[in-house]
Amino acid sequence: MATGESAVTFEMKGSISAPGFMPLICRLASEAGLGGWIRSGHKSVLLHLEGDEEEIRHFILHLPSSLYPAFMLRELNIVRHTGLECLDNLYGRKTFRILAEHKEFPTIRPDYTLCPDCIREMYDPSSRRYCFPFWGCRRCGPSYGALSRMPFIRRNTYLAAFPPCHKCEEERLDRKDFHHYKSELLSCRDCGPSLYLTDRNGNLLDDQNAICSARTALAKGEIVVVQSLFGGFYVLADATNRKALETLRQRRKLPLRPVSVIANNMDAVRQYCSVSAEEEALLTSPASPVVLLHLREDAEPGPLKVDSLIPDGPRIIGMELPPTALIHLLFHHHSAESVEDCAMCDPEFLAVITDNWDGRSRNPDIDVLMKNLSPVADKFLCHDLRIGLDCSSSVAAVRDGRARILRRSRGYTPLPIHVKRPLSRIVASFGGDVNSVIALGYGRQIVPSQHIGDLRCTEATERQIEILNRLSMLFDCVPEVVACDMNPMLYSSRAAQAFAEQRGLPLITVETHHAHALACMAESGLKHCLALILTNGSPGPDGTYWGAELLDVQLESFSRLATFSPVGMPSGNLFPKTALHLAERMKEAGFNPTRSWYTEFHLSEKDIAYLESSEKSESVRSHAAGSVADSFAAALRIAPEKVTYAGQCLSRLSG
């Protein structure tokens, strides 16, 4: 034991009973490399720290300045001070715990679109909030995205920097005013945030009629990047302007990927799409997700440039209704202060790309985001709210008469997923590198984070940790065990290992395909099942790439019952897009193709030489199902020469 190591127990008093205080202390102590615990007492909080005495002294000295403004530490007294070797350290050196009785996670409302009452008020010329986007009532507007910690009161939201004026505060406290009573996000032009419009270089263009000027820019075919009220940006263009859509694709380097659309109203959606009752319920729900809809075969030609929006794949388009008050106003802005031609700029459809930077880094400063998007934008419509997270649009579809959430994010996060088999400890789960998320689970509830995106560098994992710390603050708990993918080469797995080591927590690794099966089993309350897992491929326990697996799955283990025959991938090409690999699979299955077969499937002489060669340069063998679909697309001559977005070959096959 190093000299100078001690254990000190402190009694803390003050305004420290609010949710989030103990998780904050846990994070600060873990980052300082100290062990110990914290727990609630009768009228105080006990803090026990273990480590180097000088480090403990430094931690306590800087603790008051490290606390959030919501917490006020008034007294801190030493209860016990002894040498570390004299103590029975239950958890081990440099492990910090919250000693408290675990409870069910509190309910936190997701971010919702405006309710009908708020929309009517926003368009009422006699209202103080006429054409003002920064507010919401108890039923709508930001909630999860606005919170920094619980409880949900104004000082714990991003509107803390904008104290309510006398009139807004009167409405909030008026029990007879059912619409505004207890609405913590009430604000108006006198006390709320403001909008401003800049050019791509950040030069101010308009801070009086910013929305109206942005509408005019869209009508002229310009690309307008709008700062979302839920974090991140919307990249918008007029979806009825073919030249604007071509410019948007060129600047964002998206030659063929489908682009979703925000429609003015349900009538505009029905003009082009077949909409069932279930799909309409999704579109008009408070969550306001992007819904995948089939285009009508009998739709009359209209202004919407469908072929520019979905130039590739089946006739399915992503549609949503305006998700925020700000987007509502981009469709209808009738302010008396508007410039003269604003009324002539009412759009019907807006093409939208939500830019959350695909998990490449944690949320940077607004100036950095504007710099990164300046090659794309003609104008920026921004506000002076400081939003600490990015919650992009959710994506949903109706399959077999049931709503399916394909991407769980705004409108659904952080609603818990209820499982039938309870978890005995608080678990933090790190998703993979593709479409990554974080999840926090305890008891019969699992709370997944919003969609983070693809992790492409080590720095991108900072956002995972940031969101995990935020969930811990909101739900007033800290993880007791960490889970991640078994593949140690994933960025997310490395981040999970570093997080577990820093906090002194046990790390559990799970094989990718086993994890897919376990997720379905948890929702269905199963202990044992047969699972068929089809993926694009990931390293399996035997060194090959798995991806078409029939598994006999139990909670603690699994066995592989069947898989596709493995195919060698020349030069490490794990995601082939040619018919060569279809022929390779058929040869290994015992079918000997003829020269006419090679010609039918458009194989080159180089491909044929590879197939007939006895010495093949293979760096890895793959069972993945995804490459089969890609190979069939290539054999049918519908695969692109260069794949430009994930699932492109499969999309063309389904069309």
Image (cartoon, grey):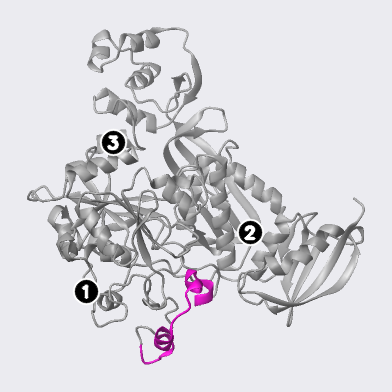
Sequence order check: which comes first, mark 3 or mark 2?
Answer: 3
- Residue 336, numbered circle: 1
Q: Amino acid at mark 2?
A: Pro
- Answer whether residue 58 is visible to the viewer in this image: yes
Q: Nearer the viewer, mark 1 or mark 3?
A: 1
Q: Crowding at label 3, few (<14), some or many (≥20) Cα neighbours within 10 Å? A: some
Sequence order check: which comes first, mark 1 or mark 3?
Answer: 3
The verdict on residue 195 being magenta is: no
Q: Classify mark 3: helix, strand or loop.
A: loop
> Which residue position holds label 3?
255
Q: Position of residue 31 (x, y in %)?
A: 70, 55
Sequence order check: which comes first, mark 1 or mark 2?
Answer: 1
The span from disc 1 to disc 3 (Cα, nearest Å) is 41 Å
The answer to which of 539 and 335 lies nearer the viewer is: 335
> Which residue position holds label 2?
479
Q: Classify mark 2: helix, strand or loop.
A: loop
Give the residue at x 46% y 67%: 146
Residue 219 placement: quadrant: bottom left
Residue 391 lies, with reference to residue 184, above or below; the image says: above
Q: Position of residue 507 (x, y in %)?
A: 66, 48
Tell me where the magenta segment starts and ends, as one range.
Answer: 154-177
